[in-house]
Amino acid sequence: MTSVQPVRGTQSLLGDEADRLAKVVATFDRVRRLYGFKRVEVPTIEQTAVFARTIGETTDVVSKEMYSFEDRGGESITLRPEFTAGICRAYLSEGWQQFAPLKLAASGSAFRYERPQKGRFREFHQLDAEIIGAGESQADIEILCLADQLLKELGIEGAILQLNTLGDPETRSAWRDALYEHFRGHAAALSEDSKARLERNPLRILDSKAHEDWPIVDSAPTIDDFLTPEAADFFAQVSEGLTAAGVQWERAPRLVRGLDYYRHTAFEFVTDRLGAQGTVLAGGRYDGLIEALGGPHTPAVGWAAGVERLAMMIGEPEAEKPSVTVIPLGPRAEAEAQRIVAGLRREGVATDMAYRGNMKKRLSRANSAGAAYALIIGDDELDRGEAQLKDLASGEQRSVSLDLISEAIRS
Ligand code: ATP
Ligand code: MG
Protein backbone atom coordinates (compact mmCIF):
# COMPACT_ATOMS: atom_id res chain seq x y z
CA MET A 1 0.00 0.00 0.00
CA THR A 2 1.35 3.46 -0.78
CA SER A 3 1.69 5.74 2.21
CA VAL A 4 -0.85 8.50 2.70
CA GLN A 5 -0.19 11.91 1.14
CA PRO A 6 -1.56 15.35 1.95
CA VAL A 7 -4.08 17.02 -0.35
CA ARG A 8 -2.26 19.27 -2.83
CA GLY A 9 -2.05 22.87 -1.63
CA THR A 10 -2.53 22.04 2.06
CA GLN A 11 0.07 22.43 4.80
CA SER A 12 0.88 20.46 7.94
CA LEU A 13 3.07 22.51 10.24
CA LEU A 14 5.14 21.61 13.30
CA GLY A 15 6.31 23.85 16.13
CA ASP A 16 7.84 27.17 14.98
CA GLU A 17 6.04 27.11 11.65
CA ALA A 18 2.68 26.62 13.33
CA ASP A 19 3.60 29.21 15.99
CA ARG A 20 4.09 31.80 13.28
CA LEU A 21 0.50 31.46 12.13
CA ALA A 22 -0.71 31.52 15.74
CA LYS A 23 1.29 34.69 16.41
CA VAL A 24 -0.35 36.48 13.49
CA VAL A 25 -3.82 35.49 14.71
CA ALA A 26 -3.02 36.41 18.35
CA THR A 27 -1.71 39.82 17.30
CA PHE A 28 -4.85 40.44 15.25
CA ASP A 29 -6.97 39.44 18.23
CA ARG A 30 -5.15 41.91 20.47
CA VAL A 31 -5.30 44.80 18.00
CA ARG A 32 -8.95 44.29 17.01
CA ARG A 33 -9.88 44.62 20.70
CA LEU A 34 -8.13 48.00 20.85
CA TYR A 35 -10.49 49.10 18.08
CA GLY A 36 -13.62 47.55 19.61
CA PHE A 37 -14.18 44.95 16.91
CA LYS A 38 -16.33 42.05 18.15
CA ARG A 39 -15.23 38.52 17.40
CA VAL A 40 -17.61 36.50 15.20
CA GLU A 41 -17.60 32.84 14.29
CA VAL A 42 -19.26 31.85 11.03
CA PRO A 43 -19.54 28.40 9.43
CA THR A 44 -16.88 26.95 7.16
CA ILE A 45 -19.68 25.86 4.81
CA GLU A 46 -22.49 27.92 3.31
CA GLN A 47 -25.05 27.36 0.63
CA THR A 48 -23.24 27.89 -2.67
CA ALA A 49 -25.59 30.77 -3.54
CA VAL A 50 -24.20 32.87 -0.66
CA PHE A 51 -20.84 33.11 -2.44
CA ALA A 52 -22.11 32.96 -6.01
CA ARG A 53 -24.42 35.92 -5.49
CA THR A 54 -22.00 38.14 -3.61
CA ILE A 55 -18.57 37.41 -5.02
CA GLY A 56 -19.94 37.37 -8.56
CA GLU A 57 -20.11 34.79 -11.33
CA THR A 58 -17.44 36.52 -13.41
CA THR A 59 -14.70 36.37 -10.76
CA ASP A 60 -11.95 33.74 -10.68
CA VAL A 61 -13.10 32.73 -7.22
CA VAL A 62 -16.62 31.78 -8.29
CA SER A 63 -15.91 30.66 -11.83
CA LYS A 64 -13.00 28.32 -11.07
CA GLU A 65 -11.77 28.31 -7.48
CA MET A 66 -14.67 27.22 -5.28
CA TYR A 67 -14.84 23.87 -3.53
CA SER A 68 -18.50 23.09 -4.10
CA PHE A 69 -20.29 19.79 -3.63
CA GLU A 70 -23.71 18.36 -3.26
CA ASP A 71 -24.33 17.07 0.26
CA ARG A 72 -26.30 13.93 1.04
CA GLY A 73 -29.51 15.96 1.11
CA GLY A 74 -28.89 17.20 -2.42
CA GLU A 75 -28.06 20.75 -1.35
CA SER A 76 -25.21 22.61 -3.07
CA ILE A 77 -22.66 23.50 -0.39
CA THR A 78 -19.38 25.44 -0.71
CA LEU A 79 -16.33 25.60 1.57
CA ARG A 80 -15.83 29.30 2.27
CA PRO A 81 -13.34 30.95 -0.10
CA GLU A 82 -13.51 34.12 2.09
CA PHE A 83 -15.39 35.49 5.10
CA THR A 84 -17.35 38.53 3.96
CA ALA A 85 -20.21 36.66 2.30
CA GLY A 86 -20.80 34.36 5.28
CA ILE A 87 -20.66 37.26 7.74
CA CYS A 88 -23.21 39.21 5.68
CA ARG A 89 -25.42 36.11 5.46
CA ALA A 90 -25.29 35.85 9.26
CA TYR A 91 -25.95 39.58 9.62
CA LEU A 92 -29.24 38.99 7.82
CA SER A 93 -30.28 35.51 9.00
CA GLU A 94 -29.23 35.94 12.67
CA GLY A 95 -30.88 39.34 13.17
CA TRP A 96 -27.56 41.14 13.78
CA GLN A 97 -29.04 44.13 11.96
CA GLN A 98 -30.48 45.34 15.28
CA PHE A 99 -26.91 45.98 16.52
CA ALA A 100 -25.78 48.02 13.51
CA PRO A 101 -23.36 49.61 13.02
CA LEU A 102 -21.28 46.54 13.84
CA LYS A 103 -17.50 46.22 13.89
CA LEU A 104 -16.64 42.56 13.39
CA ALA A 105 -13.52 40.41 13.26
CA ALA A 106 -13.09 36.79 12.24
CA SER A 107 -10.30 34.40 11.35
CA GLY A 108 -9.93 30.85 10.17
CA SER A 109 -9.33 28.70 7.14
CA ALA A 110 -10.52 29.45 3.61
CA PHE A 111 -10.44 27.22 0.53
CA ARG A 112 -9.72 27.98 -3.10
CA TYR A 113 -8.89 25.57 -5.89
CA GLU A 114 -5.91 27.32 -7.43
CA ARG A 115 -2.37 26.49 -8.49
CA PRO A 116 -0.29 26.11 -5.32
CA GLN A 117 2.93 28.13 -5.10
CA LYS A 118 4.82 30.24 -2.58
CA GLY A 119 2.20 32.14 -0.54
CA ARG A 120 -0.68 30.50 -2.41
CA PHE A 121 -2.46 27.44 -1.06
CA ARG A 122 -5.73 25.59 -1.51
CA GLU A 123 -6.44 25.69 2.19
CA PHE A 124 -5.15 28.91 3.71
CA HIS A 125 -6.11 31.20 6.57
CA GLN A 126 -7.52 34.67 6.62
CA LEU A 127 -7.95 37.47 9.10
CA ASP A 128 -11.09 39.42 8.37
CA ALA A 129 -12.43 42.79 9.56
CA GLU A 130 -15.77 44.33 8.61
CA ILE A 131 -17.79 47.38 9.60
CA ILE A 132 -21.41 46.79 8.62
CA GLY A 133 -24.08 49.46 8.60
CA ALA A 134 -21.83 52.53 8.45
CA GLY A 135 -21.61 54.65 5.30
CA GLU A 136 -19.39 57.33 6.86
CA SER A 137 -15.82 57.86 5.72
CA GLN A 138 -14.81 57.45 9.38
CA ALA A 139 -15.52 53.74 9.04
CA ASP A 140 -13.13 53.45 6.08
CA ILE A 141 -10.47 55.35 8.01
CA GLU A 142 -10.92 53.25 11.15
CA ILE A 143 -10.71 49.91 9.36
CA LEU A 144 -7.59 51.05 7.46
CA CYS A 145 -5.98 52.26 10.70
CA LEU A 146 -6.68 48.79 12.15
CA ALA A 147 -4.93 47.18 9.18
CA ASP A 148 -1.98 49.56 9.38
CA GLN A 149 -1.52 49.06 13.14
CA LEU A 150 -1.79 45.28 12.77
CA LEU A 151 1.02 45.23 10.21
CA LYS A 152 3.17 47.53 12.37
CA GLU A 153 2.60 45.41 15.49
CA LEU A 154 3.57 42.33 13.53
CA GLY A 155 6.81 44.14 12.74
CA ILE A 156 6.10 44.12 9.01
CA GLU A 157 7.81 47.10 7.47
CA GLY A 158 7.52 48.09 3.87
CA ALA A 159 3.95 46.99 3.18
CA ILE A 160 2.56 49.94 1.27
CA LEU A 161 -1.10 50.94 1.41
CA GLN A 162 -2.29 51.45 -2.14
CA LEU A 163 -5.52 53.39 -2.14
CA ASN A 164 -8.12 54.13 -4.78
CA THR A 165 -11.73 55.14 -5.11
CA LEU A 166 -14.30 53.47 -7.33
CA GLY A 167 -16.66 56.39 -6.82
CA ASP A 168 -20.43 56.21 -6.62
CA PRO A 169 -22.61 54.32 -9.15
CA GLU A 170 -22.75 57.34 -11.49
CA THR A 171 -18.95 57.75 -11.46
CA ARG A 172 -18.42 54.09 -11.91
CA SER A 173 -20.68 53.64 -14.89
CA ALA A 174 -19.12 56.62 -16.71
CA TRP A 175 -15.64 55.20 -16.04
CA ARG A 176 -16.76 51.75 -17.06
CA ASP A 177 -17.97 53.10 -20.43
CA ALA A 178 -14.65 54.88 -20.99
CA LEU A 179 -12.72 51.72 -20.10
CA TYR A 180 -14.87 49.69 -22.44
CA GLU A 181 -14.10 52.06 -25.32
CA HIS A 182 -10.37 52.02 -24.50
CA PHE A 183 -10.06 48.23 -24.22
CA ARG A 184 -12.26 47.62 -27.25
CA GLY A 185 -9.79 49.73 -29.23
CA HIS A 186 -6.99 47.34 -28.14
CA ALA A 187 -9.04 44.15 -28.09
CA ALA A 188 -6.80 42.27 -30.53
CA ALA A 189 -3.77 42.65 -28.25
CA LEU A 190 -5.55 41.61 -25.01
CA SER A 191 -5.07 38.22 -23.34
CA GLU A 192 -7.78 35.64 -23.84
CA ASP A 193 -9.04 36.13 -20.28
CA SER A 194 -9.31 39.85 -20.77
CA LYS A 195 -11.07 39.52 -24.12
CA ALA A 196 -13.70 37.52 -22.29
CA ARG A 197 -13.93 40.19 -19.58
CA LEU A 198 -14.42 43.02 -22.09
CA GLU A 199 -18.15 42.56 -22.56
CA ARG A 200 -18.96 41.27 -19.09
CA ASN A 201 -16.85 43.43 -16.79
CA PRO A 202 -14.18 45.66 -18.37
CA LEU A 203 -13.07 46.93 -14.93
CA ARG A 204 -11.65 43.53 -14.19
CA ILE A 205 -9.15 43.88 -17.04
CA LEU A 206 -7.38 46.43 -14.81
CA ASP A 207 -6.76 43.56 -12.38
CA SER A 208 -5.28 41.27 -15.05
CA LYS A 209 -2.31 39.08 -14.19
CA ALA A 210 -1.39 38.59 -17.89
CA HIS A 211 1.73 40.58 -18.88
CA GLU A 212 0.49 41.34 -22.39
CA ASP A 213 -2.38 43.34 -20.87
CA TRP A 214 -0.21 45.60 -18.75
CA PRO A 215 0.73 48.29 -21.31
CA ILE A 216 -2.92 48.53 -22.35
CA VAL A 217 -3.93 48.80 -18.68
CA ASP A 218 -1.30 51.50 -18.08
CA SER A 219 -2.71 53.70 -20.81
CA ALA A 220 -6.33 53.21 -19.70
CA PRO A 221 -8.32 56.24 -18.49
CA THR A 222 -8.25 56.69 -14.71
CA ILE A 223 -11.34 57.26 -12.63
CA ASP A 224 -10.38 60.84 -11.69
CA ASP A 225 -11.88 62.33 -14.84
CA PHE A 226 -15.26 60.82 -13.99
CA LEU A 227 -15.61 61.41 -10.24
CA THR A 228 -18.79 63.22 -9.22
CA PRO A 229 -18.25 66.01 -6.67
CA GLU A 230 -19.74 63.76 -3.95
CA ALA A 231 -17.44 60.87 -4.81
CA ALA A 232 -14.41 63.17 -4.94
CA ASP A 233 -15.37 64.60 -1.58
CA PHE A 234 -15.72 61.14 0.01
CA PHE A 235 -12.29 60.14 -1.26
CA ALA A 236 -10.80 63.38 0.05
CA GLN A 237 -12.27 62.67 3.49
CA VAL A 238 -10.80 59.16 3.57
CA SER A 239 -7.37 60.15 2.31
CA GLU A 240 -7.12 63.22 4.56
CA GLY A 241 -8.32 61.19 7.55
CA LEU A 242 -5.62 58.60 6.95
CA THR A 243 -2.97 61.26 6.73
CA ALA A 244 -4.27 62.86 9.95
CA ALA A 245 -4.07 59.45 11.66
CA GLY A 246 -0.47 59.01 10.52
CA VAL A 247 -1.18 56.19 8.06
CA GLN A 248 1.01 56.34 4.98
CA TRP A 249 -0.69 55.62 1.68
CA GLU A 250 -0.08 55.82 -2.03
CA ARG A 251 -2.62 56.58 -4.72
CA ALA A 252 -3.16 53.61 -7.06
CA PRO A 253 -5.52 55.02 -9.71
CA ARG A 254 -6.06 51.68 -11.48
CA LEU A 255 -6.62 49.50 -8.43
CA VAL A 256 -10.10 47.93 -8.59
CA ARG A 257 -12.35 45.50 -6.83
CA GLY A 258 -14.11 43.93 -9.76
CA LEU A 259 -17.70 43.72 -8.60
CA ASP A 260 -20.52 46.10 -9.20
CA TYR A 261 -21.46 46.51 -5.58
CA TYR A 262 -18.09 47.97 -4.63
CA ARG A 263 -18.23 51.72 -4.01
CA HIS A 264 -15.75 54.40 -3.09
CA THR A 265 -12.76 53.05 -1.18
CA ALA A 266 -10.65 50.18 -2.59
CA PHE A 267 -7.24 49.26 -1.20
CA GLU A 268 -4.42 46.76 -0.92
CA PHE A 269 -1.34 46.53 1.28
CA VAL A 270 1.40 45.33 -1.03
CA THR A 271 4.98 44.23 -0.41
CA ASP A 272 7.79 43.30 -2.77
CA ARG A 273 9.02 40.53 -0.46
CA LEU A 274 6.71 37.70 -1.54
CA GLY A 275 7.22 37.62 -5.29
CA ALA A 276 4.00 37.43 -7.26
CA GLN A 277 2.01 36.90 -4.05
CA GLY A 278 2.73 40.44 -2.83
CA THR A 279 -0.75 41.43 -1.65
CA VAL A 280 -0.99 40.70 2.06
CA LEU A 281 -4.25 42.50 2.85
CA ALA A 282 -7.02 43.78 0.60
CA GLY A 283 -10.49 45.22 0.83
CA GLY A 284 -12.89 48.02 0.18
CA ARG A 285 -16.34 49.46 0.62
CA TYR A 286 -19.12 47.17 -0.55
CA ASP A 287 -22.34 49.12 -0.09
CA GLY A 288 -24.38 46.90 -2.42
CA LEU A 289 -23.42 43.43 -1.19
CA ILE A 290 -26.09 42.90 1.44
CA GLU A 291 -28.76 43.86 -1.08
CA ALA A 292 -27.35 41.17 -3.38
CA LEU A 293 -28.18 38.69 -0.58
CA GLY A 294 -31.75 39.95 -0.44
CA GLY A 295 -31.27 42.33 2.51
CA PRO A 296 -31.91 46.06 2.83
CA HIS A 297 -29.45 48.62 1.47
CA THR A 298 -26.57 48.45 4.00
CA PRO A 299 -23.31 50.33 3.56
CA ALA A 300 -20.25 48.37 4.72
CA VAL A 301 -16.49 48.28 4.43
CA GLY A 302 -14.03 45.48 5.13
CA TRP A 303 -10.78 43.71 4.42
CA ALA A 304 -9.18 40.29 4.50
CA ALA A 305 -5.54 39.36 5.01
CA GLY A 306 -3.67 36.16 4.24
CA VAL A 307 -2.28 34.66 7.48
CA GLU A 308 0.37 32.56 5.69
CA ARG A 309 1.64 35.58 3.75
CA LEU A 310 1.86 37.67 6.92
CA ALA A 311 3.51 34.78 8.79
CA MET A 312 6.25 34.63 6.15
CA MET A 313 7.15 38.23 6.95
CA ILE A 314 7.30 38.30 10.74
CA GLY A 315 10.31 37.69 13.01
CA GLU A 316 10.92 34.36 14.73
CA PRO A 317 8.26 33.79 17.36
CA GLU A 318 9.49 33.16 20.93
CA ALA A 319 10.42 29.49 21.24
CA GLU A 320 8.59 27.50 23.89
CA LYS A 321 11.16 26.94 26.65
CA PRO A 322 10.65 25.17 29.96
CA SER A 323 11.93 27.07 32.99
CA VAL A 324 12.90 23.82 34.59
CA THR A 325 13.48 20.24 33.52
CA VAL A 326 12.96 17.71 36.31
CA ILE A 327 15.33 14.72 36.26
CA PRO A 328 14.30 11.89 38.58
CA LEU A 329 16.85 9.17 39.27
CA GLY A 330 15.41 5.96 40.70
CA PRO A 331 11.91 4.55 41.08
CA ARG A 332 10.97 6.46 44.22
CA ALA A 333 12.22 9.71 42.74
CA GLU A 334 10.19 9.06 39.62
CA ALA A 335 6.99 8.76 41.61
CA GLU A 336 7.83 11.89 43.60
CA ALA A 337 8.70 13.75 40.41
CA GLN A 338 5.11 13.39 39.19
CA ARG A 339 3.94 15.31 42.26
CA ILE A 340 6.63 17.99 41.85
CA VAL A 341 6.09 18.49 38.12
CA ALA A 342 2.31 18.75 38.51
CA GLY A 343 2.74 21.21 41.41
CA LEU A 344 5.16 23.46 39.49
CA ARG A 345 2.93 23.55 36.44
CA ARG A 346 -0.07 24.45 38.58
CA GLU A 347 1.97 27.34 39.99
CA GLY A 348 2.58 28.54 36.44
CA VAL A 349 6.19 27.37 36.08
CA ALA A 350 6.86 25.89 32.61
CA THR A 351 8.14 22.43 33.45
CA ASP A 352 9.36 19.43 31.52
CA MET A 353 10.44 16.01 32.76
CA ALA A 354 13.37 14.07 31.33
CA TYR A 355 12.71 10.40 31.97
CA ARG A 356 14.75 8.58 29.34
CA GLY A 357 18.43 7.56 29.25
CA ASN A 358 21.31 8.08 31.64
CA MET A 359 22.01 11.23 33.63
CA LYS A 360 24.13 12.72 30.84
CA LYS A 361 21.41 12.18 28.21
CA ARG A 362 18.81 13.71 30.48
CA LEU A 363 20.91 16.78 31.22
CA SER A 364 21.59 17.30 27.55
CA ARG A 365 17.88 17.06 26.87
CA ALA A 366 17.30 19.79 29.47
CA ASN A 367 19.96 21.92 27.78
CA SER A 368 18.68 21.47 24.27
CA ALA A 369 15.11 22.25 25.36
CA GLY A 370 16.50 25.61 26.50
CA ALA A 371 15.58 25.12 30.17
CA ALA A 372 16.99 27.60 32.69
CA TYR A 373 17.31 24.94 35.42
CA ALA A 374 17.53 21.22 35.87
CA LEU A 375 16.05 19.81 39.08
CA ILE A 376 17.78 16.53 39.89
CA ILE A 377 15.94 14.26 42.30
CA GLY A 378 17.78 11.23 43.70
CA ASP A 379 16.44 8.72 46.21
CA ASP A 380 18.98 9.77 48.91
CA GLU A 381 18.09 13.43 48.77
CA LEU A 382 14.43 12.58 48.72
CA ASP A 383 14.85 11.18 52.26
CA ARG A 384 16.08 14.60 53.35
CA GLY A 385 13.21 16.37 51.54
CA GLU A 386 15.65 17.99 49.10
CA ALA A 387 16.75 18.01 45.46
CA GLN A 388 19.65 19.48 43.47
CA LEU A 389 18.87 22.61 41.48
CA LYS A 390 21.35 23.18 38.67
CA ASP A 391 21.52 26.54 36.93
CA LEU A 392 22.15 25.42 33.35
CA ALA A 393 23.64 28.72 32.24
CA SER A 394 26.30 28.99 34.99
CA GLY A 395 26.57 25.30 35.83
CA GLU A 396 26.15 26.19 39.51
CA GLN A 397 24.37 23.57 41.61
CA ARG A 398 22.80 23.75 45.09
CA SER A 399 20.43 21.86 47.35
CA VAL A 400 16.87 23.14 47.64
CA SER A 401 14.00 22.05 49.85
CA LEU A 402 11.27 20.24 47.90
CA ASP A 403 8.75 22.67 49.41
CA LEU A 404 10.58 25.72 48.11
CA ILE A 405 11.37 24.81 44.51
CA SER A 406 9.30 27.44 42.75
CA GLU A 407 10.67 30.14 45.10
CA ALA A 408 14.22 29.01 44.34
CA ILE A 409 13.57 29.11 40.59
CA ARG A 410 11.97 32.52 40.68
CA SER A 411 14.65 34.15 42.89
P1 ATP B 1 -4.49 37.14 -5.29
O1 ATP B 1 -4.53 38.28 -6.25
O2 ATP B 1 -3.15 36.95 -4.62
O3 ATP B 1 -5.07 35.86 -5.83
P2 ATP B 1 -7.05 37.75 -4.21
O4 ATP B 1 -7.40 39.07 -4.79
O5 ATP B 1 -7.65 36.51 -4.78
O6 ATP B 1 -5.46 37.58 -4.10
P3 ATP B 1 -8.57 38.31 -1.82
O7 ATP B 1 -9.75 37.58 -2.26
O8 ATP B 1 -8.57 39.80 -1.79
O9 ATP B 1 -7.29 37.80 -2.64
O10 ATP B 1 -8.12 37.73 -0.38
C1 ATP B 1 -7.49 38.52 0.63
C2 ATP B 1 -6.10 38.02 0.97
O11 ATP B 1 -6.11 36.63 1.22
C3 ATP B 1 -5.07 38.18 -0.13
O12 ATP B 1 -4.56 39.47 -0.15
C4 ATP B 1 -4.02 37.17 0.27
O13 ATP B 1 -3.17 37.70 1.27
C5 ATP B 1 -4.85 36.06 0.85
N1 ATP B 1 -5.05 34.97 -0.12
C6 ATP B 1 -5.94 34.91 -1.15
N2 ATP B 1 -5.86 33.74 -1.79
C7 ATP B 1 -4.89 33.02 -1.16
C8 ATP B 1 -4.34 31.71 -1.33
N3 ATP B 1 -4.79 30.88 -2.28
N4 ATP B 1 -3.35 31.30 -0.50
C9 ATP B 1 -2.89 32.10 0.46
N5 ATP B 1 -3.37 33.34 0.70
C10 ATP B 1 -4.37 33.81 -0.10
MG1 MG C 1 -6.93 35.06 -6.08
Image (cartoon, helix red, strand yellow):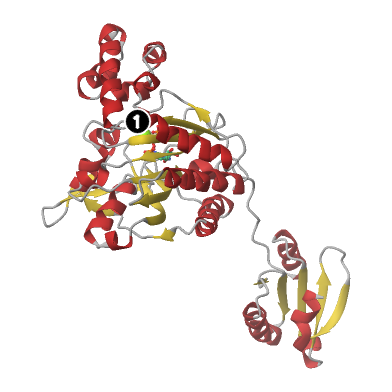
Q: Compared to 230, does 146 lie above or below?
A: below
Considering every residue shown, the one lying at the far front of the view is: 229
Q: Give the answer, above or below, for where 159 lies relative to 108.
A: above
The quadrant where ligand 2 appears is top left
Residue under pointer 1: 167
Residue nearest the observer in this picture, 380 or 126: 126
| Residue at x 42% of width, y 50% of height | 129
Classify residue 30 as left or right of residue 226.
Answer: right
Q: Quadrant of residue 31?
A: bottom right
Which residue is at the far bottom? 383
Crowdedness of circle 1 by 10 Å Cα count: few (<14), some, many (20+)? many
Q: Residue at x 38, y 15 (%)?
A: 217
**Image quarter (top left, top right, bottom left or bottom right) of the C terminus:** bottom right
Q: Residue at x 67, y 79 (%)?
A: 344
Element on which disc 1 rests: loop
Identified by mark 1, the residue type is Gly
Residue 221, percent from left and from top: 36, 15
- Residue 191, horizontal then vertical, whole percent: 31, 15
The answer to whether the beta carbon of the residue marked 1 is less than 8 Å from any atom of ligand 1 is no
Locate residue 117 relative to residue 249 in the image: left or right. left
Whole-percent x and y of residue 397?
Answer: 87, 73
Whether residue 48 is visible here, answered yes or no, is no
Give whichever of 267, 25 is nearer the camera.
267
Q: Nearer the viewer, residue 153 or 278?
A: 153
Where, by quadrant of the figure, is residue 104 drawn? bottom left
Quarter assignment of residue 404: bottom right
Would you place residue 318 above or below residue 181 in this image? below
Going by the picture, which residue comes out furthest to the left?
74
Q: Position of residue 379 (x, y in %)?
A: 76, 86
Give the vertical position of 159 relative to 89 (above or below): above
Q: Is residue 333 left or right of residue 165?
A: right
Whether residue 176 is visible, yes or no, is: yes
